[in-house]
Image: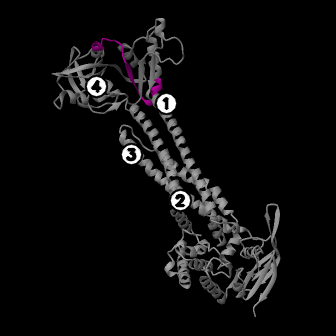
Amino acid sequence: MIHLDNIERVFHVGDEEVHALRGVSLTIQAGEYVSIMGPSGSGKSSLLNIIGLLDRPNQGRYALDERDVTGLGDDELARVRREKIGFVFQFFHLVPRLTAAQNIALPMMLAGIDPAERQRRLAVLLAQYGLENRAGHRPDQLSGGQCQRVAIARAMSMQPAVILADEPTGNLDSTTGREVMALLEGLHAAGGTLIMVTHDRELGARAGRQLRMVDGQLVGDERNA
Amino acid sequence: MRPSDFLDFAWQVVRGNRSRTLLILLAMGIGVAAVLMVTSLGEGARRYVLNQFSGLGANLVIVLPGRSETAGGIPGFLIGKTPRLLTTDDALALTRSHAVRRIAPLIVGAGDVHWNARSRETPILGTTAEFIVVRQMAMGQGQFLPEGDPHHSQPVCVIGAKVKRELFSGGTAVGEWLRIGDRRFRVIGVIAPQGQSLGFNTDEIVVVPLAAAQALFNTESLFRIMIEAKSRTLVPQAKADALEIIRLRHEGERDVTVITQDAVLSTFDRILGALTLAVAGIAAISLSVAGILIMNVMLISVTQRKREIGLLKALGATGRQVRLLFFTEAALLALAGGSAGLIVGKLGQLVVASIFPDIPFSIPWWALVAAPVTAVATAILFSVAPARKAAQLDPVLALSARK
């Protein structure tokens, strides 16, 4: 479902060129659980941004669901993101003035989904992630684990094909981290494609397929038996 | 996204940043209120002056002695010339013009009016029977001066409503004899109250026949000659005829000034209209300042909300949606500010009107429409730049921005 072919990403920092990704080629099938690991600055996040269509490669081709998305315009990319990709961030990225329910409903609002349908899906999501009692709370009234649950519910609200998680437990203590992982893995178990960036080996090892990156190149691609 | 979603989202932002919202409302409100107040002052002054003049009567031409000199030169009295006086015969000669319907010569002075032990100093008008028609006044009781040769007079007078109240305090006035100076006049009528008109109040005057006033003040000279033209279109003709007739009677000397009500009116109208526009323009500057304030606040808001904008884009917001979100926010603020300004402006106008009840303050309709529309238009115009900036943010950079 995800097919990357010889992706290059170069940043210009002052006069210097920084090669964040050097000729990365990768195919991920629907329903896989992939972790991307590597030291800081190895290009993990750059790769995730390219896969999530937040960023464009300087060279190479990217096909998502058999469709070449390399040359799409900004608005078309936004539309594909909205329908196919759900993001879970390390810093949750909730809008502080909106309630948990409003945060969860953001993607549905952007997609112009009928308010009645929105309410219906919202009720299901709140129940699914144990947030019924927190629906009217704003992020500063929620714990870290609850914030990340809101973020995951938001990512799932458009029922995306791919979940991209960037250090989803990086800002949580180990207990809540485990809870959040259980939720994400539950999504995978239900048939979703889960791609997670982490530098925690133990966490990465739980994935069915582990990619290792160093200096912008893929140096390892292992599968658990 | 649905239109209601844009409104909802913008409302959350506006509500979430109270002090920022109040600041913008204040700036917008002051701008709009200033435009309304200032135009209502200008419009009030214009209407006041127009009312004063239209109280004079229709198709009016006024002849005054002496010529208003606009070119320099030595004033006549220095080289031994005195301006010729306007006489009763000059006035009667004016009726020869076919453009003139009727005339009313006028003498004005002040005198003590006595009745029994009471006395009062009032302006005294000497004129003829036509005066009441030319000036379009109405009688409250009795009759106005009788018709007849203006060279001769009967010992009768007509008094204003206030004079009657003060001298007779509720008693009957018609039929009583008044003494003015050393002459006695029988009251034959009371003028209906009508208030201020061009400097003097007809409620406070005493009107006597022309010849009687000439004798009282010991002068032949008229203060004014009021002419009523036969129709509005004949006003210029009446004016030209009046000038020519007086010139012939004064040995070819053009020594009177003739003014028409229309000319005076339209001059005042133009001057006051221009004044209103000018001050409204100055007030409009405060509106544009408010617009610039909105731009600044929105620019700061874009910088502060980088992460939020990045998030919205990651969640699938298009550039257009982000732009529209910011536009909606600016429009919402401007609309609220504009309405606040409308209310404050209207209240201010009422306050000023209660302080100066004589002046008919009113906000002209164009200002009522233009002020809020300008406010919203400037707000949206000035939020183009911030909205574009937000829409063009790179989601990766925006998301990684630290608070």
Please give the residue where the numbered disc 3 appears in the rendered image: B350
Disc 1 residue type (three-letter): Thr
Label 3 sits on a secondary structure element that is: helix
Disc on the earlier residue, 2 or 4: 4
Q: Mark 1 points at which residue?
A: B267
Q: Where does residue B249 sit, x and y in percent of width and height? A: 43, 11
How far apart are labels 2 and 3 at the CA level?
27 Å
What is the chain letter for disc 4? B
Mark 4: amino acid: Ile
Q: How far apart are marks 4 and 3 (CA)?
A: 33 Å
Pick the quarter of the image with the N terminus of chain B: bottom right
2 or 4: mark nearer the eye: 2
Asked if A139 appears above or below B350 in the picture, the reply is: below
Mark 1 vs 3, N-terminal side: 1
| Residue hosting label 2 | B332
Query: At which x and y percent is residue B192?
Result: 27, 32
Residues A173 and A179: in front is A173
Q: On the same chain: label 4 and label 3?
A: yes
Q: Of the two numbered discs 4 and 3 on the same chain, state the one appearing first in sequence.
A: 4
Q: How far apart are marks 2 and 1 (CA)?
A: 43 Å
Which residue is rendered at x = 61% and y = 64% of the image? B305
Query: Taking A134 as reference, is B216 above or below it?
Result: above
Specify the quadrant of the image occupied by residue B52: top left
Q: How far apart are marks 2 and 4 (CA)?
A: 59 Å
Q: Give the range drawn in magenta.
A: B214-238
Report the chain holding disc 2.
B
Mark-to-mark CA distance, 1 and 3: 28 Å
Rendered residue at 43%/51% (across/down): B343
Do tag 1 and tag 3 residues touch (Cβ < 8 Å)?
no
